[in-house]
């Protein structure tokens, strides 16, 4: 540990000294803008995409899974009750979701279910393509999603009632309160959602391809979000946020199975507290967060009753100091986690982890640079030093280029290490997955036109894979290697009444090592990673109306590898339209949305049907 | 399934002797071969990924060429979720699809679907007469009696918990009650004429498979049971047994070391050598002569297989690789020398020999 600290200091010392030397020969620039938000601070070289409010819309039933599937190049797998993302050809647990900078992924299994993560109630949703584990910690390997809920002080008052109905038995109600002065900002969102999810589909797996009714997939959700920000004085502010949710779901089976009695219950309680203090040359932010997750999955027909409760207690401190053209950022994190699982050998597992990260950021004329080092200590395994180096340069007023080279990691989950039972056992000797990411991109920012492209190369080693060992039981090991590379592009055109937002990604993500002498998947595209995915949305605003057409393409995916041929799911193109009418003379807006307008039959996971054309009507009554 | 297959061979012989085979059937070495596309080779049942519905059947010719997905290639639909086993009875193949709660009945000549029988959680099937067959079914903790003329369920017979392997000898069916997700230690013996339970024998914890030898004796393999407490610590463990049943009574019990969990009992065509997988950590295939007096300590094949088969002087084993890509089937001579291997479907589990 002493050596590591020495290395950090050495690295810092070198960078600061050499950069200071460079700085002496240059003219001074305006001071770097101080952001207490860690994402913004470390955006140099990073491919960040902020979800457009128009695309998020007003719907209380809109989920993160829909939003990403329809409006980004991220592939979403939807099966049973679960929707998980694939960023840059990585697996589901390689996406980190952060709520005000606090990781939300389950510490039991590393996942967050995007099908029960709503998109309303946040000030901003940002998608980061590419790993950022040096700043945000374990799991940010393929990408990260940042949900920011702390309101700004912008003198706003609003009460909004929302009612929503959909053609497959969707009924959702929401009440939203927003009140902010220049000292106090408060918002609240309470929603209830009931979705019968009854839709007809063609069962291509049965004789005669009958049209059947999917009548087992009911969802009942309740969610409450309260956010409060208080400006104590011009230099100090406090924030409190609470997000609680309860979701009860019937879990449908694949369409070859005639019935299901599977149910899933997810409850979360998340509390966030922060204090931010600006001083002459810097800002210090202290965050505390308490996260609780209560999960239960039952399938009595198969004798399955799986339960766990997790608790995380997180303390995070972040200091930024601005010295001339330099921005120094030092952060520390201390997290206590515990999981009680009916499948762990000691019922309750406790763990502590601590981490420090440090960065130096520098602006030199048209050039910006960011170096980060992170070191994490964990009770049961060691985490390597995680560095990051990023540059961006403004070539012209409208063209900038960026480069990033960083290391990322993902810690083994509690399930990976502590699972116990007949037929499967965790492996306490697992180490973190390791990934090196290189990416290069350029951004064109013209007044009406924005275009960005990023090429990346991601090497993941020591990936954790559950394998059946010779005695027939399952156990995870750090043996898989994946090489992912590709290209991502985003296009935005804005005119007075028309916006066009397009995206396209090419992803090649291949298995690089045989995990078994008979493994024939080496060099082949990973399962459920499309080579091509893209979409385009047209948003037209005309007086009281806005009109959105969104079309997106999801390429073929492999479901299983074979020596001669792979099994695949076909590509599909889906179209959604939405019309919103917001007249000035009454405080009401109406949104009509048709999802899957062309009534396409498609699937993102083998033999799991998706709904056809669906009409959703959203009525908002707003008092300002 | 394999045991039922063996029994199939014996039945086939009986049928041949009675000269009751149909005109278009060919008699070859005492066995009935049904003509068609699938006569010279064997089938492998591929479970597919649980919960995904991609189970399938592969056909491997005697020359070692493979046709995968033989059901969906001639039918416009798929087999479904977890293809558990397949049996050839008369001129039909019965494919038991566990997760999809059905039995697909196809013509063995071309694998075209004839009927679908709805059941609950089917495991293995055995013909008990020309008119009917028994299907073990975890969903009802009993046997579904299939009317072979109409391909419907005519009645059910209650057994123990989680009826698994089944075999038929001398007018009785022997059902291994493996206990499903819990524990059972019995074999239910059913009079196949009356469909009534004749008796129940306690053979050892978790009986999983059974075969009939050349003398009509029934051999049952039990896996032994491991009891865990709520924190998944091992509380107790019992041994697996190889049990010989003659005249519906236990004649001999050979105990395996505690901690081993032997499985997949199959028998060669002549009914003289048993094969099974066993081992404390790494499993291997052992051969046991029915006249033997103690369990072998030297493995015939030092490889862990997901499923076993024996036919025509060869021993077969499947490897599911990583359980997501296509698996493999290995063929060995009776003395354990590798002959060939072929790539089949996802999670190959069992064999069905024509």
Image: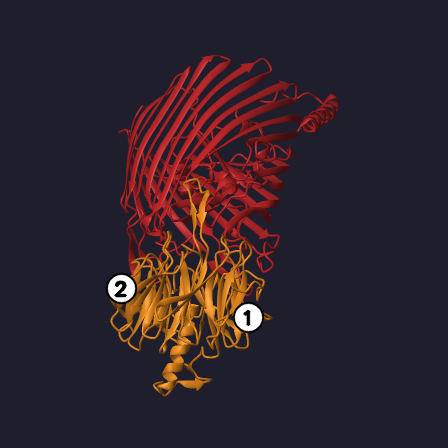
Chain colours: A red, B orange
Picture coordinates of residue A440 (x, y %)?
A: 63, 41
At label 2, counting other C-alpha atoms closer than 10 Å, the crowd grade (few under 14, some 14-19, many 20 or more) is some
Q: Nearer the viewer, residue A6 or A141?
A: A6
From where the camera sits, is residue B77 visible? no
Q: Nearer the viewer, residue B241 or A118?
A: B241
Picture coordinates of residue A190 (x, y %)?
A: 32, 30
Residue B25, compared with residue A147, is above or below; it is below
Q: Which residue is mark 2?
A: B157
* Picture disc at residue B331: 1
Residue A314, compared with residue B19, is above or below; it is above
Specify which label sits upstream in the sequence, 1 or 2: 2
Q: Secondary structure at mark 2?
A: strand
From where the camera sits, is residue B32 visible? yes
**As drawn, is A187 to the left or to the right of A425?**
left
* Picture disc at residue B31: none
Give the alpha-carbon distance from disc 1 to disc 2, as whole Å: 37 Å
Q: Secondary structure at mark 1?
A: strand
Give the farthest residue toward the top. A233
At label 1, counting other C-alpha atoms closer than 10 Å, the crowd grade (few under 14, some 14-19, many 20 or more) is many
Picture coordinates of residue B35 (x, y %)?
A: 42, 82
Residue A292, compared with residue B327, is above or below; it is above
């Amino acid at each position: 540990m002493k050596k590591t600290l020495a290395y950090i200091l050495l690295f810092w010392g070198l960078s600061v000294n050499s950069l200071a030397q460079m700085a002496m020969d240059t003219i001074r620039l305006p001071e770097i803008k101080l952001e207490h938000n860690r994402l913004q601070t470390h955006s140099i070289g990073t491919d960040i995409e902020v979800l457009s409010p128009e695309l998020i819309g007003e719907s209380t039933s809109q989920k993160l899974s829909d939003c990403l599937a329809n409006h980004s190049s991220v592939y979403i797998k939807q099966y049973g009750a679960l929707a998980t993302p694939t960023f840059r050809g990585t697996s589901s647990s390689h996406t980190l979701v952060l709520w005000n900078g606090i990781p939300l992924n389950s510490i039991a299994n590393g996942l967050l279910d995007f099908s029960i993560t709503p998109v309303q109630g946040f000030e901003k949703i940002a998608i980061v393509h590419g790993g950022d584990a040096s700043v945000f910690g374990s799991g940010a390997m393929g990408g990260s999603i940042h949900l920011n809920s702390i309101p700004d002080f912008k003198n706003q008052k609003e009460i909004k009632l929302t009612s929503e109905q959909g053609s497959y038995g969707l009924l959702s109600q929401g009440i939203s309160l927003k009140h902010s002065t220049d000292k106090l900002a408060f918002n609240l969102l309470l929603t209830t959602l009931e979705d019968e999810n009854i839709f007809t589909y063609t069962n291509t797996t049965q004789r005669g391809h009958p049209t059947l009714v999917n009548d087992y997939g009911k969802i009942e959700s309740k969610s409450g979000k309260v956010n409060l920000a208080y400006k104590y004085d011009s230099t100090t502010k406090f924030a409190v946020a609470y997000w609680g949710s309860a979701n009860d779901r019937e879990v449908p089976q694949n369409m070859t199975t005639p019935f299901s009695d599977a149910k899933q219950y997810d409850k979360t309680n998340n509390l966030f507290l922060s204090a931010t203090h600006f001083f002459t040359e810097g800002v210090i932010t202290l965050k505390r967060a308490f996260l609780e997750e209560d999960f239960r999955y039952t399938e009595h027909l198969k004798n399955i009753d799986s339960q766990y409760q997790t608790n995380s207690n997180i303390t995070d401190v972040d200091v930024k100091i601005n010295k001339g053209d330099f921005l120094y950022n030092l952060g520390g994190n201390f997290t206590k986690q515990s999981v009680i699982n009916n499948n762990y050998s000691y019922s309750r597992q406790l763990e502590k982890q601590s981490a420090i990260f440090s960065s130096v950021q520098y602006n030199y004329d048209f050039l910006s640079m960011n170096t980060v080092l992170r070191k994490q200590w964990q009770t049961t395994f060691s985490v390597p030093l995680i560095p990051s180096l990023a540059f961006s340069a403004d070539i012209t007023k409208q063209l900038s280029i960026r480069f990033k080279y960083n290391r990322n990691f993902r810690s083994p989950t509690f399930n990976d290490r502590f699972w116990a039972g007949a037929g499967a056992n965790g492996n306490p000797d697992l180490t973190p997955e390791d990934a090196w990411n290189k990416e290069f991109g350029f951004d064109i920012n013209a007044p009406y036109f924005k275009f960005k492209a990023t090429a990346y190369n991601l090497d993941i080693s020591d990936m954790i894979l559950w394998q059946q060992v010779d005695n027939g039981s399952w156990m995870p090991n750090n043996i898989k290697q994946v090489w992912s590379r590709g290209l991502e592009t985003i296009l935005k055109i804005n005119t007075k009444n028309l916006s066009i937002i397009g995206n396209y990604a090419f992803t090649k993500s291949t298995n690089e090592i045989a995990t078994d002498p008979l493994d024939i998947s080496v060099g082949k595209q990973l399962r459920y990673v499309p080579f091509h995915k893209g979409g385009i949305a047209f948003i037209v605003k005309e007086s009281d109306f806005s009109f959105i057409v969104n079309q997106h393409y999801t390429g073929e995916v492999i479901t299983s590898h074979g020596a001669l041929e792979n099994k695949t799911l076909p590509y599909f193109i889906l179209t959604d339209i939405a019309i919103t009418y917001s007249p000035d003379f009454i405080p009401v807006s109406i949104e009509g949305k048709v999802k899957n307008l062309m009534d396409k039959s498609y699937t993102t996971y083998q033999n799991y049907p998706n709904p056809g054309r669906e009409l959703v009507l959203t009525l908002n009554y707003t008092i300002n | 399934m394999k045991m039922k297959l063996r029994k199939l061979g014996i039945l086939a012989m009986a049928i041949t002797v009675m000269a009751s085979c149909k005109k278009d059937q060919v008699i070859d070495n005492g066995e009935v071969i049904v003509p068609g596309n699938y006569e010279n080779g064997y089938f492998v049942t591929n479970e597919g990924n649980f919960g995904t519905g991609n189970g399938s059947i592969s056909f491997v010719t005697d020359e070692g060429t493979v046709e995968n997905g033989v059901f969906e290639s001639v039918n416009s639909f798929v087999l479904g979720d977890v293809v558990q086993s397949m049996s050839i009875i008369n001129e039909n193949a019965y494919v038991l699809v566990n997760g999809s709660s059905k039995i697909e009945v196809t013509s063995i000549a071309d694998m075209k679907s004839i009927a679908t029988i709805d059941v609950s959680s089917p495991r293995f099937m055995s013909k008990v007469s020309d008119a009917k067959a028994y299907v073990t079914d975890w969903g009802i903790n009993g046997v579904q009696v299939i009317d072979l003329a109409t391909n419907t369920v005519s009645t059910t017979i209650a057994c123990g918990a989680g009826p698994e392997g089944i075999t038929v000898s001398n007018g009785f069916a022997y059902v291994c009650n493996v206990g499903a997700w819990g524990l059972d230690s019995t074999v239910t013996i059913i009079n196949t004429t009356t469909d009534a339970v004749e008796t129940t024998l306690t053979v050892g914890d978790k009986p999983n498979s059974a075969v009939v030898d050349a003398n009509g004796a029934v051999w049952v393999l039990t896996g032994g049971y491991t009891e865990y407490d709520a924190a998944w610590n091992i509380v107790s463990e019992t041994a697996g047994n190889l049990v010989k049943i003659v005249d519906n009574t236990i004649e001999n019990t050979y105990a395996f070391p505690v901690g081993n969990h032997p499985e997949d009992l199959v028998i060669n065509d002549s009914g003289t050598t048993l094969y099974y997988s066993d081992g404390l950590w790494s499993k291997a295939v052992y051969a046991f002569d029915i006249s033997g007096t103690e369990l072998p300590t030297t493995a015939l094949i030092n490889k862990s297989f997901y499923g076993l088969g024996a036919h025509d002087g060869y021993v077969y084993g499947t490897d599911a690789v990583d359980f997501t890509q296509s698996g493999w089937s290995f063929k060995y001579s009776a003395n354990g020398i590798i002959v060939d291997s072929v790539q089949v479907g996802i999670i190959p589990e069992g064999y069905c020999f024509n």
